[in-house]
Image (cartoon, rainbow, N blue to C red):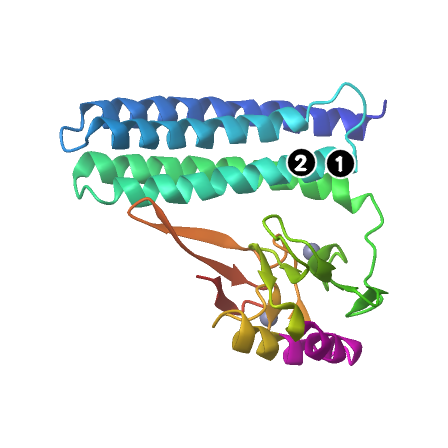
Amino acid sequence: MNGKNDKLKEKIWNIRNYIQKLEDIKDDIIEYLNYLKELDDSTRNLWISDVKEFYYNTFSAWEMLRPTKDIEFKNIENSKGFLYVARNFLSKIISQLRIFQNDKSSKLIKKAEETFKECWDAFWFVFQRVLNEKEILKPTERVIKVSDLEYHLPCSVCSKNAVEFKIGYGRFDKSEALVFRGITHERSMNINLANNLFRILQEKDLLGVHNFMKRHHSFEGLDAYCPECDKIYCWEHYNAREEFDDGFYDCTYGECPNGHKRMIDD
Ligand SMILES: [Zn+2]
Ligand SMILES: [Zn+2]
């Protein structure tokens, strides 16, 4: 084992300080919710379980980085996954606390946001250190034709699969459909649209795909696509964030590496 590795392991170990702070915040918020007279019991229980999920997902993100041997790429990806889920729970919790405009509520929000930001940065320091040493694949194509029935759109930064279109069965489909899987959700569309879409994909016309999705899917179009860059980004590189309103999912915003921000799911 070399010194660099030791240093990294120390960095990972030190993340536990933030985890501990978040645990305190979790307990503070739960205590606050328990004393909040305005809440009925079922809402209270739901909100408390959100706070716990927030904490446990952050904790799991940390655990993923603590394998017995070297840190593998897979662990990093899993860790990121938990961290993203934790961040979404945090925005949900904050939208719930915001309903009560008082001092205590504002203080808890501020403390939670600040501590999670520190924790998030500490995680990303580790992710970047590990990933810098691996070779990052440069995407070769904008559109990958897997078969006559399936196309993939890779992220323009990391080349990870961001979007899939295929003819097949979605989770609840009884008959074949045009299945779209983007960075925010999966949805089955009318199979009769496939010919039209696949023609656009064959021309590698990403803007065309975006406009197609605007017409047939939703106003936001293709969730992984930044129209200003004319590029595809995965969840991570679109820096996608879920937003909540009074505790309910509202929408997802993406901000590409060039700072273009738009609503990508509503
Ligand atoms: Zn990416
Ligand atoms: Zn952009």
* Residue 251, placed above or below residue 99: below
* Name of the residue lying farthest toward the top: 68
Q: Nearer the viewer, residue 127 or 230?
A: 230
Amino acid under label 2? Answer: Asn
The x and y percentages for residue 215 are 53, 78
User: Measured from the top left, where is residue 157 in percent x and y?
Assistant: 72, 60
Q: Is residue 125 left or right of residue 151?
A: left
Q: Quadrant of residue 83 in the image?
A: top right
Question: Who's the residue at 43% across and 35% down the image?
Answer: 115
Secondary structure of the residue carrying tag 2 is: helix
Where's ligand 2: which quadrant? Answer: bottom right
Marks 1,2: beta carbons within 8 A = yes
The residue sitting at 83% across, 55% down in the picture is 137
Quarter of the picture containing the N terminus is top right
Looking at the rendering, the stretch of residues picked out in magenta corresponds to 194-209
Give the residue type at disc 1.
Answer: Lys
Of residues 23 and 132, the one drawn nearer to the viewer in this rendering: 23
Q: Quadrant of residue 208?
A: bottom right
Quarter assignment of residue 237: bottom right
Q: Which residue is mark 1?
A: 74
Q: Could you tell me which residue is drawn at 67 percent across and 36 percent down?
A: 78
Tell me residue 133's x, y (percent): 82, 43
Please name the predominant secondary structure of the magenta segment in the image: helix
Q: Does the residue tagged 2 have its C-beta within 8 Å of any atom of ligand 1?
A: no
> Would you call the spot at circle 1 few (<14 residues within 10 Å), some (14-19), or many (20 or more)?
few
State the mark number for residue 178. Answer: none
Q: Residue at the spot x=48%, y=60% of the render?
A: 253
- Tell me the quarter of the image containing the C terminus: bottom left
Q: Is residue 50 magenta?
A: no
Identify the mark at residue 78; answer none if there is no mark.
2
Question: Distance from label 1 to label 2 (Cα)?
Answer: 6 Å
The image shows residue 242 at horizontal and vertical percentages of: 46, 51
